[in-house]
Image (tube, rainbow, N blue to C red):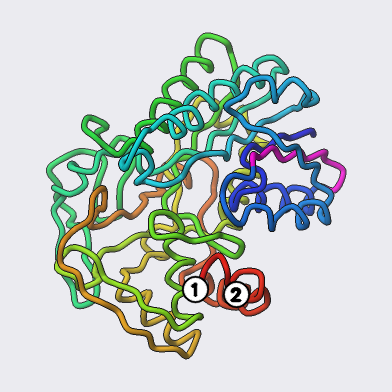
Amino acid sequence: MNILITGGAGFVGSSLAISLKQTYPAYRVLALDNLKRRGSELNLKRLKEAGVEFHHGDIRNKEDFDSLPAVDAVIEASAEPSVLAGLDGTPDYLINTNLVGTINCLNYSLKHKANFIFLSTSRVYPIRTIETLNFEEEATRFVLSERQPVAGVSARGIAEDFPLTGARSLYGTTKLASELIIQEYNEFYGLKTVIDRFGVITGPWQMGKVDQGVMVLWIAKHFFRQELGYFGYGGTGKQIRDMLHVADLFRLVDWQLHHIEEVNGEIFNAGGGWDSSASLQELTEICREVTGNTIPIRSVPETRTADIRLYVTDNTKVTSLTGWAPQIGIRQIVEEIAVWLKENEQELAPILK
């Protein structure tokens, strides 16, 4: 199989490319990336050592696809991933990358009749609706109540039929718009597609920032003994997310690549679920135990723009149709990232410190 991964030098893209090449040495794996995100250049050596072909290009430019060979499958992992992108200025780069870029990827896939796997996001769900969900406050976290005012949510988490009406951030909107275009290509051009709405993805080699990659950011701040803050919702750190290790993400994408007929046209929510969820308060304690460092944490009661109190993925549909379920829990994730930080401290300090 010949596979193109867009955003192939990013955290998720490079992880997928390397894992595919290691699992299937005979496959030809190509990684396309514009290297805009700081830290992505560190993955070039890893890609080369794994036998992945790197192509420097930008999905915004349809001409950059002309020099690429025909492939059997495209994994669209490129994106401007910040939920705050476009809110402090022009949204041009965000829209051109996350929407126009996806259309260029679709046309390339259509040209070569290549199957198409789209890495979307849980941020397609509207912020205001999530913020009005019924919840309970426990000692260290908020939890979803069983009875809810809307469909698609229960104590298990948020499912695919959660309402889509409302604002969700410019980032989430570009991803949802891409999903709609993909469904049109599937229906009217016969392109085989699958859409995965992932929650918080994490693992070694993620260059964590406040607005994207919070898990790595949290661990790195403990590792480098720097300050953090509990922002919003009273400043207690009880807001909760489920975390998906990139290796678990690879297991799902790998299955979909080789069973596309069984999931053609489907949309899945995929995340760590309740078993791999943590509040900031709980994550702080695990980081303290793993790193041995206790750091100052400010309490800021005011809630920030585009933040949400809680999001946990209901994996019922994806598990039922594919048999996939996440296997790596929070503590193992923290331990792996801490080891990665220690082993690559000199390279990572200028980026994460």
Which quarter shows the N terminus?
Answer: top right
Q: Which residue is mark 2?
A: 341
From the viewer's side, name the closer residue of 198 and 147: 198
Magenta part mainly helix, strand or loop? strand
Instruction: Give the amino acid type for the residue marked by disc 2 in the picture.
Output: Leu
Q: Residue furthest front?
A: 89
Q: Quadrant of residue 105?
A: top right
The residue at 37%/82% (across/down) is 285
- Residue 297 is left or right of residue 209, and the answer is left
From the viewer's side, name the closer residue of 273 and 238: 238
Q: Secondary structure at mark 2?
A: helix
Q: Which residues are magenta?
A: 25-34
Give yes or no for contact between labels 2 and 1 (Cβ–Cβ under 8 Å): yes
Q: Secondary structure at mark 1?
A: helix
Instruction: Give the amino acid type for the residue marked by disc 1 in the picture.
Output: Ala
Q: Residue furthest right?
A: 26
The residue at 58%/31% (across/down) is 262
Residue 54 is tagged as none
Q: Which residue is mark 1?
A: 220
Question: Would you call the spot at circle 2 few (<14 residues within 10 Å), some (14-19), or many (20 or more)?
Answer: many
Q: Earlier in the sequence, mark 2 or mark 1?
A: 1
Q: Position of residue 295 (x, y in %)?
A: 37, 85
